[in-house]
Image (tube, rainbow, N blue to C red):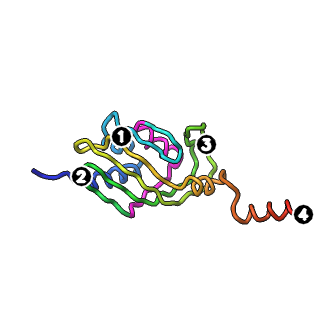
Amino acid sequence: MATQDLGATVRAMYEAWNAKDMDRCASYAHADARMTNVPFGAKLSFREYIENWARAFPDGKIEVTNLVSQGDSVIGEFTGSGTHTGTLKGPTGDLAPTGRRVEMSFVESYRFRGDKITEGRIYFDAFTFFTQLGVGAPTQAGAATTTQQARH
């Protein structure tokens, strides 16, 4: 009996996402698959999850840096990059396009049922993400200036 290479499945799913072929990307998951965005505290259907990121970052690309596969689980580490030119839906509301470029590391963990994704989680540094978008906490230099102004 042949063993399914689930790591190759995740790699193919990322390639489909890079091509913005959402139908092909979604075909790697069960129709009832759910994704949890851990930093946002949000759970979405797999299709809604992939479309949300693709809409917000239409030029977005995923560059796989590491895939680990064991049993029915795959962990993918990747660098995600793109320009925020579309609306990103979040648990506290929509984030309007900032026009800012983001490049950072992400980790996604997937569980499979048979040869398709049944659930997943994404982990990333939300502080870095929002700072790169210009909607996070002030930069170190900005914080230092504010602190110096407060002393005077």
Please name which of the two marks, 2 or 1, marks the residue nearer to the observer.
Answer: 2
Answer whether labels 2 and 3 touch (C-beta < 8 Å).
no
Q: Is residue 46 magenta?
A: yes
Q: Considering the numbered disc 1 on the image, is that residue within a helix, a strand or a loop?
A: helix
Could you tell me which residue is drawn at 49 percent across and 41 percent down?
A: 52
The amino acid pointed to by label 1 is: Asp
Circle count: 4
Residue on which the image places disc 4? 152
Residue 128, placed above or below residue 24: below
In space, the residues marked 2 and 4 are separated at their CA atoms by: 61 Å
Mark number for residue 23? 1
Could you tell which of marks 2 and 1 lies nearer the N-terminus?
A: 1
Mark number for residue 71? 2
Of the 4 image quadrants, the one containing the C terminus is: bottom right
Answer whether labels 2 and 1 touch (C-beta < 8 Å).
no
Could you tell which of marks 2 and 4 lies nearer the N-terminus?
A: 2
The amino acid pointed to by label 3 is: Leu
The amino acid pointed to by label 2 is: Gly
Q: Residues within 10 Å of mark 1 (few under 14, many from 20)?
A: few
Could you tell me which residue is drawn at 62 percent across and 52 percent down?
A: 99
Could you tell which of marks 3 and 1 lies nearer the N-terminus?
A: 1
Q: Considering the numbered disc 2 on the image, is that residue within a helix, a strand or a loop?
A: loop
Residue on which the image places disc 3? 95
Answer whether labels 4 and 3 touch (C-beta < 8 Å).
no
User: Where residue 27 sits in the image (x, y, percent)?
Assistant: 31, 41
Could you tell me which residue is drawn at 76 percent across and 65 percent down?
A: 144
Question: Which span is picked out in magenta?
Answer: 45-65
In space, the residues marked 1 and 4 are separated at their CA atoms by: 58 Å
